[in-house]
Every structure is written in C-alpha cells, then in structure tokens.
C-alpha cells in the first residue's frame, strides 16, 4: 500500500471555470464522432452490428462520468448548513466513489471518509457524499481529489478542522503497465486543528477503522 500525506500548498490547481462547455446534446454528439473515429483507428469496424450504437453510448457515459465539471461543491454544501452546539468530531465514513485517471482515462475507485470538528454549524450528511461526487466525477488524480474535498469542506463549513482519508484501486496499475492486481493507494489531507494535533488525527483513524459487533 502506498501512503501519501498531502500538502495543500503543493496540490496543483484544478479549475475549469475558464473553459466554455457546450450543451449536453451537443457535447454528446461531438464526443460520439471522436469515439467512432477511435474505434476505426484501433482496427475495428464501427459499422458492425455490435458497435453501431457504441459511440453514442460511450459518449453519454463519458459525459455522465465527468458531470462534476458542471457542479459546484461549495454551492451544494451551502444549501444544507445548520446550527449545531456540539464540538466533537463528526465523521461520514466509507463514501464510495468512482473517478477516472487523468493520465490514462481509466477508472479508479474506492472509499472516502470525511471528519470535521464543527465551530457552530454542521452540514447535512448527504451533502458530504455529494461533494465527493463533484470532485470524483472529473478527470482526476487521487492526491488532488483528496485535497480538493478537504479544501472545499474547510472553506464552506468554516469548521475548526477537516480531515479526509481516501483509499482506492487504479485500473491503470491493474490492467496496463505494471499490472499489479493487489495494489491500492491511500491518501490523506487535513486542515485546522488536525494539522498539529496527532491525537485528533489518530482518533479519526481509529474511529473509521473500528469494528463493532
């Protein structure tokens, strides 16, 4: 297992705000044209029975799997912030996600756990899962995915601290290249009180790994 503790200041910027995005139908049709060309370039016949509708199906799937470019995580979270008097850690663990590696456009997938210590407000639990989807449904690397989730939750919730733990399997390592089937990657990122408090970090790790009868 590879373990990386992300430094937010070293994480690369990942913004699409300057890129104009056509309407969905226009995008799907344009992508389908390119996929049809790719099918031909790899030596297949796009006109054979099993492939006639493949370009359109694949284009729709790609648009769906990258829908995070049209979503705003901060806006999603701001719709479900509530007053909260507590001060202990809140954790949503094992949020499943599916993403696509930006280097080979192959899937990687796994689970993300998010913990935070509130100041005077909390967020609707489902919104944390939606935030994961916003950033996962883009061309990504796991290290940046982890960092972006942490930054967004920290910025919007204004919590005392946020911590994110992500573990994933990458098909770019399993079906090509080194072809290591048992490999997985773990990344973490944290902010606020978690930065200098190893006890709090360990409490989070212990809680997400706890097994109860």
Image (cartoon, helix red, strand yellow):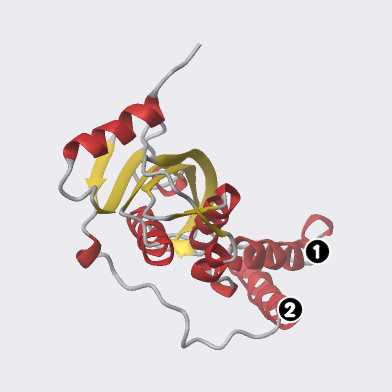
Residue 22 appears at what percent x and percent y?
65, 86
The residue drawn where x is 37% and y is 66% is: 155
Q: Which mark is residue 80?
A: none
Q: Establish if 19 lies above or below 176.
A: below
Name which quarter of the figure residue 28 lies in.
Answer: bottom right
| Drawn side of residue 166 relative to residue 197, left or right | right
Question: Residue 207 vs residue 8: left or right?
Answer: right
Judging depth in this view, the residue of 134 and 93 nearest the camera is: 93
Tell me the quadrant of the picture where the N terminus can be found. Answer: top left
Q: Could you tell me which residue is drawn at 54 percent across and 67 percent down?
A: 78
Q: Would residue 111 be found to the left or right of residue 4 on screen?
A: right
* Mark whose residue sits in front, 1 or 2: 2
Say which residue label 2 marks: 29
Q: Which mark is residue 53?
A: 1
Residue occupying image coordinates x 37% and y 40%: 89
Q: Is 22 drawn above or below residue 87 in the view shown?
A: below
Around disc 1, counting alpha carbons within 10 Å, would you say few (fewer than 14), some (14 to 19), or many (20 or more)? Answer: some
Q: Is residue 111 left or right of residue 48?
A: left
């Amino acid at each position: 297992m590879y373990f990386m503790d992300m430094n937010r200041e070293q994480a690369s910027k990942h913004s699409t705000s300057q890129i104009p995005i056509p309407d969905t139908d226009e995008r799907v049709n344009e992508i389908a044209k390119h996929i049809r060309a790719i099918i031909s370039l790899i030596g297949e016949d796009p006109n054979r029975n099993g492939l006639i509708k493949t370009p359109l199906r694949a284009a729709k799937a790609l648009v769906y799997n990258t829908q995070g470019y049209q979503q705003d995580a901060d806006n999603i979270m701001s719709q479900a912030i509530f007053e909260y008097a507590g001060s202990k850690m809140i954790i949503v663990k094992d949020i499943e996600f599916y993403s696509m590696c930006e280097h080979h456009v192959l899937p990687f997938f796994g689970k993300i756990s998010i913990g935070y210590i509130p100041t005077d407000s909390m967020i609707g639990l489902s919104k944390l899962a939606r935030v994961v989807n916003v950033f996962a449904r883009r061309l990504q690397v796991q290290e940046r995915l982890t960092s972006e989730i942490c930054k967004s939750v920290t910025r919007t919730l204004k919590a005392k601290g946020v911590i994110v733990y992500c573990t994933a399997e990458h098909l770019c390592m399993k079906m090509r290249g080194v072809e290591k089937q048992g490999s997985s990657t773990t990344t973490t990122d944290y902010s606020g009180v978690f930065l200098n408090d190893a006890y709090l970090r360990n409490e989070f790790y212990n809680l997400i790994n706890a097994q109860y009868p």
